[in-house]
Image (cartoon, rainbow, N blue to C red):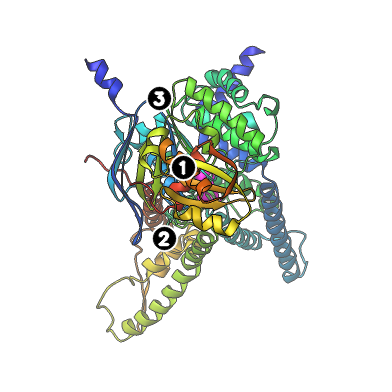
Amino acid sequence: MNEQTLQEQPMIEIRGLVKQFGSFHALEGIDLTIAKGTVFGFVGPNGAGKSTTMAILATLMAPSSGYAKVDGYDVSVNPHEVRKRIGYMPDFFGVYDQFKTTEYLHFYGASYGIPKAEREVLIPQLLELVNLSDKKDAYVDTLSRGMKQRLCLARCLVHDPELLILDEPASGLDPRARIEMREILKELKAMGKTIIISSHILPELAEMVDEIGVIEHGSMVAVGNVADIQNRLRVKRFLHVRLLGREEEAESFLRDQPYVNRLLRDDKGWQIHFGGHDEEQAMLLESLMAAGFRVVSFSEAQTNLEDVFLEITRGGGGAE
Amino acid sequence: MRRNETRGRLGRFDLINPVLDKEIKLRMRSPRTMWTLFFYLLAIGFLAFVAIYLTQELSGRNGAAFNPEQSKMLFYFLTMAQLGLVAFMAPGLTAGVISGEREKQTLNLLLTTQQSSATIIISKLLSSLSFMVLIVLSTIPIYSMVFLYGGISPKQLVLVFLFYLFIMLTLGSIGIFFSTLLKRTMLSVISTYGVTLFIFAGTAMLYFVMLSITTNYYYSQPAGSGSTYNWVGHIIAMNPVAALMSILEPSLSDQVFMVHRNAGPVRGEAPMPLWLEFMLAYTIISAIALWIAVRKLRPVSRRRR
Ligand SMILES: Nc1ncnc2c1ncn2[C@@H]1O[C@H](COP(=O)(O)OP(=O)(O)OP(=O)(O)O)[C@@H](O)[C@H]1O
Ligand SMILES: [Mg+2]
């Protein structure tokens, strides 16, 4: 019984979280619960309040009101207990240039109270995990941006935290490095860590993210698993249409059709954010043909998180 | 072989706290450290040679050696020159220790570790202090030139060096205070030098202004009445130069509390030596500065909801 309640304790519990900077409300009452072992994708446009929320969870900022708990510990009441349980990677961070990679990790390890003997075993493993073993004796300032990013991730892991708070861990990385980062995150997920990650590479993360939360202007707009969120939005699917000729005419025709929420022109044709299902989709094709347009292709595009994200953030709210 | 290795490890990682260890390592690896030491020694060496040369000139080179009186003057000069250099160095070395990490964006990472705010602040202070001590100790050979001629006791030298340590601690605490409270290192450095300037020049100016005001007042009083000591002495007790002088010349303490009447000066009794009053006052100020810095380093945690 007792064990059961312990298991059900959420890793993150945020209630009515408000953060003000002067008269500006960066967060206006956020509620969020994240269960243990969940990988949570945190999305929202620039300035929405992602980094602010994460900094509060990392005990670096005091909430103006409301509370945030990590594993049952309030970040404002028991910051010390919270720090034991989290590995935080800020969106921007610096390194101590005069340190070598291993010294850098030794310093943070020691700062978390890990004995030297343990660190000697642990640090090579961490470097292995983030693929930096060959750089173990390099000075930190000689590392590339992507390597520093991976080093910082290794740093988050020295004290084996249960919760990882990763603020755009892949920003500024090239596609290859992003894929590497994703592989590392998958490994961490397999280790059973709870991960909250804000990122602009969510499409790449889609397969490993269990839930996403969308934040805008300091409020949670939608929370749930990816499919749920998609359902709650007006966008049911994305269609791609290519027609031959009569472009101006076609554009206004398409715009006037039911369930067409948004029309985006690209060099090949139109992308349609479509609010209907199969039946309505078939009707759209029929009316195009009936109006005498010559349809080259009419297909359902692969929906992905990025589209969802764009729909939500450009659509000024989006959720019904 | 193995045992040696273990002992080295213990000494390097487990006995010293990690923040202090890191601070000292990084400081010693920075090229700036070497240049600071170099220019400091250059400055004090230059001042010493100028002083020796001038004393030689003034005494007309009629003797093979200084007399003890000259040697004492030289020592005082060096002591005050070094005080000036310490006052110049301490803010520069401490006013950036927190704000610098904030600007380099390493502070947040440090603050999410298990190290307490007090450990971080005190370690930063200790590491700056240890470097300053190293610098000041490295000037001892220059003092030995003065020693050759006699006139100064080793005890005085030790006291002077302890006083330097105290000044470094005080200015260092103030530097760390501003470094924690102000976001930018530039502002912190300016504020710390501003306060340092006030402690050195402001208190002296205030003293002389108040002295002239109170002296006028006491002159109008009949002899044998009113207070027996002039309270403005407490102002100059806040001045490091006066405090250091009172170590070298103990009679100074009584002099500054003296009341001047037209019947002639009335013998004033210093409530305590200037340097003691100085140390008491600045110990409190430093403690408060450090306490605030510790409190403000991280967001304040609430007790219970
Ligand atoms: N220290 C601060 N002082 C004043 N305003 C701040 C501060 N930090 C953040 N803000 C404001 O709070 C809002 C939320 O910022 P935050 O950094 O959380 O956004 P974000 O969602 O992380 O955006 P991005 O995608 O650009 O990283 C912004 O409008 C920002 O200007
Ligand atoms: Mg951000």
Q: Real-space Cα distance between discs 2 and 1?
A: 74 Å
Residue bearing the label numbered 2: B274
Contact check, label 3 and label 1, Cβ < 8 Å: no
Magenta region: which residues? B97-107
Could you say where residue B83 lies in the image, as x and y percent from the top left? Answer: 57, 58
Residue B265 appears anywhere in the view: yes
Amino acid type shown at disc 3: Gly
Could you say where residue A320 lies in the image, as x and y percent from the top left? Answer: 33, 47
Q: Nearer the viewer, residue A297 or A5?
A: A297
Q: Nearer the viewer, mark 3 or mark 1?
A: 1
Report in which chain the residue with disc 1 lies: A
Where disc 1 sits, the SS reads helix
Characterize the local packing of mark 3: few (<14), some (14-19) or many (20 or more) Cα atoms within 10 angstroms. some
Residue bearing the label numbered 1: A308
Residue bearing the label numbered 3: A37
Report in which chain the residue with disc 2 lies: B
First along the sequence among labels 3 and 1: 3
* Ligand 1 within 8 Å of the CB at mark 1: no
Q: Is residue A5 left or right of residue B141?
A: left
Q: Residue at x 21, y 41 (%)?
A: B305
Task: Specify the quadrant that holds the N terminus of chain B.
Answer: top right
Q: Nearer the viewer, mark 2 or mark 1?
A: 1
In this rendering, is residue B19 above or below A221?
A: above
In the rendered structure, does residue B262 fall within the stretch colored magenta? Answer: no
Q: Is residue B85 left or right of residue A279?
A: right
Q: Nearer the viewer, residue A282 or B6?
A: A282
